[in-house]
Image: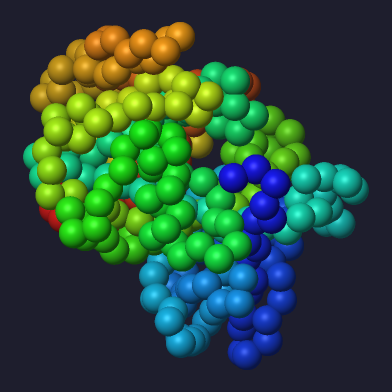
Amino acid sequence: MAGLAHVLVHVRRGGVEVPARFGQSVTGAFCPAHEDAAVVSCGLECGRFILSDAAFPGSTETILKRPPFCPAKLLGQQPAASVPAGAPGDRGVAAAVAVLLQASTRRVLLTRRAATLAVFPNVWVPPGGHVEPGEELLDVGLRELEEETGLRLEAGTFSWRMLGLWESVYPPMLSRGPPRRHHVVSYLLLLSAESHERLQARMRPDEREVSAYAWLDPPVLEHIAAAEDGAEGAGAVPSTLPATLSITELCRGSARAAEVPTATLLNTAPAEGEDVERVSTGTKFALRLWLEAVGP
């Protein structure tokens, strides 16, 4: 939906509301500096995405979290830290939605972002994108799911719930340069009444957004969720998991079955140097919440 303004995040504390500032940690507004999570109330109100320390009409209470290496957090700990003038962040902090789609067979859909994308290329994530004016959170999730994968969920075939909020900054490490994108992502869980086989049969992914996708089962997802980011080295593959995982790769309008090393999806985000193909840190956070909600 190019050309539309994005819904921005506002922080409300003690009844006082201000726009969230790009490059300054939103999570840090609700927790001590040594912590990385807080319980907040959130919701859309008059074209703004509100994060509040108190409930308000239509709000949902949930967890808001950032990684310990969050660039916005680390910038706040530096004397006279600032974001370069004219940075994309002059727009403020944008609200976004990502959806964990669970099939009736308990498989969860993850997609690999196209290599040509400016943000998190080649990283595995759930479908998602910006909140546009006039949309509710579920509307955003369903729209992005359809735009990225071609999969349309009809009313009455699924249920949903909020999992949690994640503060996402790109690049994800200060070692890779100053922030260029800053979002608060609402992770939603969609529970489909259909099997992953039936859902996959209807998928028509957009190669501009997605280069591959996979329906992963709980044992694999449990190990992905446990892989801690911010450390060097590839993920070790437990003996209980296969050496490779089945995925569907997209190329020039066609889709083909392929295999990816299980270690790739267990990779951790390196603290220094170039990024690697991996599951995003925010996705791991959402998967941990998913496991708590539905059990391994």
Between residues 201 and 218, which one lies in front from this camera angle? 201
The number of numbered discs placed on residues in the rendered structure image is: 0
Q: Is residue 54 left or right of residue 6?
A: left
Residue that appears at 11% across and 38% down: 195
| 234 shown above or below 141 | above
| 71 shown above or below 269 | below
x, y percent for residue 62: 39, 70
Q: Residue furthest bottom?
A: 15
Q: What colour scheme was applied to this rendering of the protein?
A: rainbow
Q: Residue furthest right?
A: 85
x, y percent for residue 225: 30, 41
Residue that appears at 32% across and 13% down: 255
Residue that appears at 17% across and 42% down: 103
Q: Is residue 43 left or right of residue 104?
A: right
Q: In the picture, which quadrant includes the N terminus?
A: top right
x, y percent for residue 155: 24, 58
Q: Is residue 174 visible in this depiction of the protein?
A: yes
Q: Is residue 64 visible in this depiction of the protein?
A: no
x, y percent for residue 272: 61, 26
Residue that appears at 47% across and 21% down: 207
| 7 shown above or below 248 | below
Q: Is residue 290 left or right of residue 3?
A: left
Q: Is residue 24 left or right of residue 120?
A: right
| 254 shown above or below 219 | above
